[in-house]
Every structure is written in C-alpha cells, then in structure tokens.
Image (cartoon, rainbow, N blue to C red):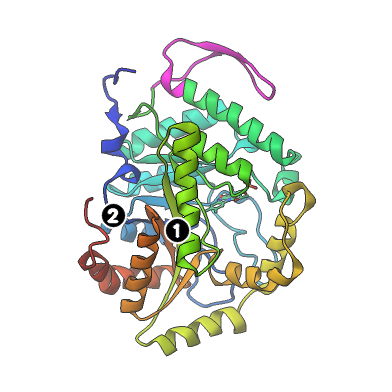
C-alpha cells in the first residue's frame, strides 16, 4: 500500500511505536477522581484546565500514550468516581491540540459509536496530532451505561464478533480509495467513503484491553497495542503472562504486539510515610461502596467472569487504590526499582497514575523521572 501525499509512516510519527525501552503514559485523566476511588483531597477534579495540565506534564516527558477511559456514568458511593468526565474523542482532539510530543488515544465503545463515525473522528484527531493518535477499542462490560443508551450489551462472544466487523470497516475506510458496500451481521454500509485519510500509514495504531481468552485472540490478531492488568507480585508469573501474549500473536497470527500495563505510584520521602499515606487514602478515605459496585457489575453473568467471593476484598482494594494499577509504594528509589522490575518482566509500556494526580505527576517529573532516565529505562533500544 503506497504512502499517499500528506501521510507518514506510523512507526515514525506515533510515539507508541517508538524505541524507548520502557514507554510511559497516563490513564483516565479525562474522568473525575482519576484512578482512585477515595474521598482524598487533591484527587483529580475534572475541569479542562486540570486535564490539560496533566497532559502537558506528560508531554514534557514525551509520554507515549495518554489513555482516556470511555465512561458514561459513575459508580455511585460517596464520591461517584468516574461520573463527571470528558468524552474521549473530543477529549483526545483537544489534548492533541494542547500537546506536541505525546501519543494521544481515544477509547471507543464498539456498540456506541458507528464505525464510520469512529473512523472519521479518528482521522480528524490523527490530523490534529500530526500522526500521534491511537484508537483504543472497548467492547463494554458496564451494562448500566449501555442501558442508558437503550442499547443491550451483547453476549460476550457476539461482542467480539461485532468488534471484528466494526474494526474491519474502520480499517477499510482508512485505507481504501474506492467507495465500498458492506453487508454484514451487524452493519450495512452503502458506498462507504472517507477522506481525508489519516496521517498515519497504513492506518493509526489500534489498542485493545480485552482480558478474556476471546479478548486475547482479538487483540493479538487485529491490534498493535495490547493492554493487560498485572495480577500478581510474582515476577515469573508475570513474565509467563507477557510471553504468552507474544507467542499467541507470533505463532497464531504471525504478528508482533506491544504489551502495556498500568501502575499506580504512591511516593514519599520514606517507605513508612508512603505506606501510611496509602493506608490513609485507601482504608480511611476509600470509597468501598463504589468499588463494590464495579465488582458487582463486572461479575454480572453477561460478562462471563468468575469472581470468587474470597477474592473480592482484594479486588475492591485494587480499584480503590488506583483502578487496578499495580501499586508501587515507597521512596523515589523504590519506585524506580519497581519500574525496572516491570520493564524486565517484558512490558513495552506502563500507564502511570497517582492518587493526587497533578501533584504526583509533577513530583514524578521533577524528582523521579531523572532517575528513570538515569536507570536507562528511557534509552532507545
Ligand atoms: C487498561 C484498560 C482500559 C480499559 N478501558 C476501558 C474503557 O475505557 N471502557 C470500558 O468500558 N472498558 C474498558 N476496559 C475493559 C476492557 O475493555 C474489557 O471489557 C475487560 O478487560 C474485559 O475483557 P473481556 O471483554 O475480554 O471479557 C479497560 C480495561 C483495561 C485493562
């Protein structure tokens, strides 16, 4: 497929394809409270200036992925975390305009955005950002937000069948010059047309965070960036998990994928202070009702996930402390050691969150990031 005038090889324009040993990003900076579920003072208060301030800090450090979460309603409890927030395509367009280096992502619910609209909006953001854009595809699991639209969440297998058809249409629109008709199970398109094409050639990066077996196959077959949560402190188990993704992509689909995860940083002068602060915002101020609401929704039969009751307390804590991000708690040296360990596990990138997002990211830039660089984690490899 020849590069058209105005297009660029995405390996050159999109930092998500960059060569740094450990790529970095932010997560959920488009939503109120950021990644915590806690009545903590200083947590993200979602205004446009506040979300831009975070993007600019990340941009200074040339973070490769600013990932918003597609959320339409909050999780109740005392603080209604993730309730107020910015829609992710419009957020990404604004953030693309406010930054110059960082990778910018929009997160799209397949069932809520028609593929032509998704392809068109994505192309616009790719132009605004000069080819720094990645599309994150999510199938949805939070059925109350689907009900808000009068849309029923499809059964798990059908969600992925629909996503495959959706993404195939999006890719055709991005790459084909001739108009095309499409008659599928979920979509019907007459004379599909899209111009201008995205900046990135052959098309923008695609990200997915499915965690089921079906989701792993979808991501390895069709996507460039695979997102997976870290569920254990055991290094060998994590290594095996990452290697299994790479093997699946290589052996079944002849592809290479970049594997990302997320970590939540709680840093202080001493380890004891960091642990005390963790205890304060999680155990004293945590919004456990909201976290339990998340688990009940995820555990609904339609999501086909098995959450044994004895695991639920630990799961709720993971959501309260940082929306499932791997907790890194300690001094700046301990944080850098933690990042080194996760890099050695084989992750290409990590989205970072902080309980007090802006204060934390600022401190990370001033105090921790120089050590991250010194440790070689940002070297080109
Ligand atoms: C890093 C990350 C980001 C995600 N972002 C969203 C999101 O913005 N909106 C959403 O509805 N689900 C989101 N999810 C959930 C996944 O898309 C997916 O539904 C979940 O991992 C269940 O996987 P499965 O569909 O394979 O069962 C995210 C998951 C992860 C790990």
The residue to which callout 2 is attached is 21
Ligand 1 contact, mark 2 (Cβ < 8 Å): no
**Visible in this render: residue 309?**
yes
Q: Secondary structure at mark 2?
A: loop
Labels 2 and 1 touching (C-beta < 8 A): no
Number of residues whose C-alpha sits closer than 10 Å to that of mark 1, classed few (under 14), some (14–19) or many (20 or more): some
| 38 inside magenta stretch | no
| 191 inside magenta stretch | yes
The residue to which callout 1 is attached is 239
Residue at 59% across / 43% down in the picture?
215
Residue at 59% across / 30% down in the picture?
164
Q: Secondary structure at mark 1?
A: helix
Percent of width and height locating residue 149: 72, 41
In the rendered structure, which segment of residues is drawn in magenta?
173-196
Percent of width and height locating residue 245: 49, 46
Residue at 32% across / 70% down in the picture?
364
In screen coordinates, is 113 left or right of 300? left
Reading the chain from its start, which is encountered first: label 2 or label 1? 2
Determine whether 35 is above or below 129 in the image: below
């Amino acid at each position: 497929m020849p590069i058209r005038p105005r297009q660029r090889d995405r390996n050159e324009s999109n930092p998500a394809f960059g060569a740094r040993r450990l790529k970095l990003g932010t997560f959920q900076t488009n939503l109120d409270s950021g990644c915590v579920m806690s009545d903590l003072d200083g947590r993200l208060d979602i205004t446009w200036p506040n979300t831009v301030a975070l993007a600019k800090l990340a941009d200074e450090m040339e973070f490769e992925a600013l990932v918003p979460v597609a959320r339409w309603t909050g999780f109740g409890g005392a603080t209604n975390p993730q309730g107020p927030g910015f829609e992710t395509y419009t957020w990404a367009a604004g953030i693309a305009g406010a930054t110059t280096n960082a990778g910018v992502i929009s997160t799209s619910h397949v069932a809520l955005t028609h593929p032509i609209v998704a392809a068109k909006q994505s192309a616009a953001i790719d132009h605004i950002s000069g080819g720094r854009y990645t599309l994150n595809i999510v199938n949805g699991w939070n059925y109350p937000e689907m009900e808000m639209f009068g849309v029923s969440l499809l059964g798990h297998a059908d969600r992925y069948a629909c996503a495959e058809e959706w993404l195939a249409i999006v890719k055709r629109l991005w790459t084909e010059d001739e108009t095309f008709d499409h008659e599928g199970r979920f979509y019907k398109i007459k004379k599909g047309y899209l111009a201008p094409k995205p900046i990135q050639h052959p098309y923008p990066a695609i990200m997915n965070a499915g965690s089921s077996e079906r989701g792993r196959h979808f991501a390895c077959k069709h996507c460039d960036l695979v997102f997976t949560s870290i569920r254990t402190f055991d290094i060998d188990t994590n290594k095996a998990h990452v290697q299994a993704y790479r093997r699946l992509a290589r052996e079944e689909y002849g592809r290479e994928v970049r594997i990302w995860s997320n970590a939540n940083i709680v840093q202080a002068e001493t380890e004891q202070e960091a642990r005390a602060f963790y205890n304060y915002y999680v155990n004293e101020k945590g919004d456990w009702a909201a976290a339990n609401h998340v688990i009940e929704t995820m555990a609904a039969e339609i999501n086909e996930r098995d959450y044994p009751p004895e695991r639920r307390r630990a799961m709720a804590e993971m959501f309260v402390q940082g929306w499932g991000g791997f907790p890194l708690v300690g001094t700046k040296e301990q944080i850098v050691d933690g990042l080194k360990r996760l890099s050695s596990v084989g992750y290409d990138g990590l989205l970072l969150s902080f309980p007090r997002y802006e204060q934390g990211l600022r401190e990370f830039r001033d105090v921790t990031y120089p050590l991250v660089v010194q440790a070689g984690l940002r070297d080109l490899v």
